[in-house]
Amino acid sequence: MYSQGLIGADGQTHEDAAFLAAFQARIDAEQKIEPNDPMPEGYRKTLVRQISQHAHSEIIGMQPEGNWISRAPSLRRKAALLAKVQDEGGHGLYLYSAAETLGVSREEMTEQLLSGAAKYSSIFNYPALTWADIGAIGWLVDGAAIMNQIVLCRCSYGPYARAMIRICKEESFHQRQGYEIMIALCNGSKEQKELAQDALNRFWWPSLMMFGPPEGDSVHSNQSMIWKIKRFSNDDLRDKFINASVPQAEKLGLTIPDSDLKWNEAKQGYDHGEIDWDEFWRVVKGDGICNRERLKNRRRVDRDGAWVREAAMAHAQKRRARMASARIAAE
Amino acid sequence: MSEAAMPLWEVFIRARNGLSHKHAGSIHATDAEMALHAARDVYTRRGEGQSIWVVRSSDIVASDPVDKDMMFEPTASKIYRHPTFYEIPDDVGNM
Amino acid sequence: MSGTCETIMASNQTLFSYVLRLADDHLILSQRLGEWCGEAPTLEEDLALANIALDLIGQARALYAYAGQVEGKGRNEDQLAFMRYERDYQNLLITEQPNGDFAHTIVRQFFISAYMDPFWRRMESSKDEMLAAIAAKASKEVTYHLRHTSEWVIRLGDGTRESHERMVEALDDLMMFTGELFEMDAVAQEMLQSGVGVDASDLKAEWQHTVQTILQEATLELPKAGHMQTGGRTGRHSEHLGHILSELQYMQRSFPGLTW
Ligand SMILES: [Fe+2]
Ligand SMILES: [Fe+2]
Ligand SMILES: [Fe+2]
C-alpha cells in the first residue's frame, strides 16, 4: 500500500540521441518495455528506484497494522486484518520480483532498506494507536495507494505494470475492509465515534502527503511522465483522492480536519488547506516517531531469519551433492 | 552482511483444467519442493490455481530482443497461412 | 420423559465442552502464528505462516459458532472466543507455548499438525454432522500444514550445525507437551462412546510414526518421553496464556458490549 511520488529520482541518462529517439518512439506508441529490451540507463535506474521504494513501503507498511492483529476486536476482523497484512507482504514480494527483472537482487534491495539508504513511504512512520486507526489506514492510506496504483497498471515497464494489476486486484478489499471498520465505529457508541474522528484527524494530512509534494517543474518528474512511468502529477492524484474521500467522510458523519476545505464550483472539486511540507520532509528524512523503530524491527527480522535461510541453502547444497554422488556411484 | 542469493523461480499456474499454465510471477526458494510451496502460498490465495509449475529462472532460455527482426519478421508476409487469404464464394456457407 | 431430557442436556453439555476445547486449540495457536506476520525468515514464509494462521482462525470460528449453537444460550463466536476467563480456556498447553525462534514454531506446528491430521480424518466419520463437515474442510488444510512443516523440519535438522542445534533444543523444549494430545478424559470418552468424538489415545502410534519418519530424514531424534505436562483441558495453563488473553481480549474488555 504505497503511493508516494518517487523520492529522489535520478533520470539522468547518457545514450545518444538516435537511441533515445527510438526508445521514445516505442513509449509514445504505447509499446510495453520488457526486461531484456534495450532501454536508457536513466529509465532503468528510475524504475529500480521507484519499484524498490514501492516494495519497501509494502514491507514496512506491514508493521503499523501488524501491530493490531493480536488485538483485533472480533474473529472476523482478525481474519480480515491478517489476510490484509499478508497481502501487503505479497505486494512487496511481487514488486521485488519486478525490480529483479532489471538486474538488481532482492538481497541487494533489502540491504539498501536496512542500511537506511533506500526510502519508503513516510506514512508508515506514523503509529497505529487505536483500533480505529486500522479503519482509517484501510480507508485512507489504502485508498490513496489505490488511486496511484491504478494508474501504475498502465506504466510503460511491463513487469511493473503486471505486478500492479495483480496488486490492484488484491487491494480492492483493503479499502473496503477499512471503511467497513469506520462504518461500524460511526454507527456505534459515542466513544467509538470519537475513536473514528480521532483516527481521521491523525491520518488525514499524512494521507494527503502520500502523493508527494507538488512537482513544480521538477526535471525528474517530467522525465518520468515522458517515459510513461507515471501518468499524472502528484497534485492531480491528490485532488482526485480528496474529491473521493470528502463525501465518504460525510457519509460516516465525520469531519475532515481542514477548516479551509471547500467546494469549488468552477473546478468541480475541493480546495484544501495548506499541507505542512516541512513535516513531510522531516518524517521522510528520518525524524518521524516510528522511523528508527520500523527499520530496527526490519533489521532484527533479517538477523533472526539469517540462520534459517542459511540452513535451507545448506540443505539444498547437501541434496545436490548426494544426488551427484549417487549418479557417479551408479555409473 | 551480504548473504548468498536464494535462487529465483518462475511460477506458472493453471487456473482451471482445460486452460494452459500461465506465468503468474516469481518467488525465491532454495529447492524445488519449497518453490512449489512458496508458489502455492503466494500465488494461489484466492482460488487461482488447479496446478502449479515452477522453473528455475536461470533454466529459462529466452530469445534475444536484438534478434527480434530475424526471429519474428519473416512470418509477417506469409499471409497464405491465414484463412482470410482464400476467397470462397459466400453461397458455399461457413468454411 | 424428564429422564430422557436430562440425558440430552448432559450430552449437550459434554458436546459443548468438546467443541469448545477444540475451538480454543485453534484460536490460541492461530493467535501465536499471527505474531509471525511481518517477522518470518523470508517473505515467502511470511505468507505461508499467515496462510496456516488463517486456516486455524477459520476452523476456530466454525467451532465456536457451533459450540454456541449447542450451548443454546445465544453466545456467538466472539463472546465465546473473547469473553471468558483464563481458567475457562481449555486449549492444549502446546498451543500456547511461545513462538521462540523459527525452530520452536516449526516443531510446535509439526507436532500439532501430525496429530490433527489423523484426528480430523477420523472426525470426518463422526455421527455429528456438523463436526464431520468441519473435519472434512479442516483435514485438507492440516494435511498441507503437516507437509509444509515437515519440509522445514527436514531442512533445519539437516541444514547447518546451528540449525540442527536449534531444532534439538526446540524438540527438547516441546516434547513434554505432547502427552496431553493423546489424553482421554471423561468428556472425550463420552464423545467417543456416542460416536461423535475421536479416540485420541489411538492416534499415538500414527503420530509417532509420522514424527519419527520425518525426524529421521532430518537427522534428528524424538527426545525420550519423560514426564508429560497436563492441565489445558481443565484450565490449568502455563503462564503464557494470560498474556495471550490480555492482547486477545483487550478491545472486548476495554469496551464491553460494543459491536466492531
Ligand atoms: Fe500498496
Ligand atoms: Fe493495501
Ligand atoms: Fe499493498
Image (cartoon, coloured by chain):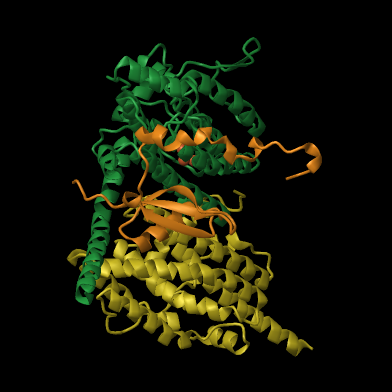
Chain colours: A green, B orange, C yellow
- Residue C126 rendering spot, x and y as whole percentages: 61, 81
Towards the viewer: A295 or A262: A295
Judge left or right: residue A329 versus residue A221: left
Judge left or right: residue C136 versus residue C165: right
> On the image, which quarter does residue C135 sit in?
bottom right
Residue positioned most to the top: A266
Q: Is residue A87 visible?
A: yes
Judge left or right: residue C107 versus residue C200: left
- Residue B24 rendering spot, x and y as whole percentages: 47, 48
Towards the viewer: A54 or C204: A54
- Residue A17 rendering spot, x and y as whole percentages: 33, 15
Residue positioned most to the right: B91
Towards the viewer: A51 or C119: A51
- Residue C4 rendering spot, x and y as whole percentages: 74, 88
> On the image, which quarter does residue C164 sit in?
bottom left
The residue located at (27%, 61%) in the rendering is A312
The residue located at (38%, 58%) in the rendering is B35
Count up the numbered dots: 0
The residue located at (25%, 76%) in the rendering is C220
The residue located at (25%, 67%) in the rendering is A319
Q: Is residue A53 visible?
A: no
> On the image, which quarter does residue A174 sit in?
top right
Where does the C terminus of chain A fall, quadrant-wise?
bottom left
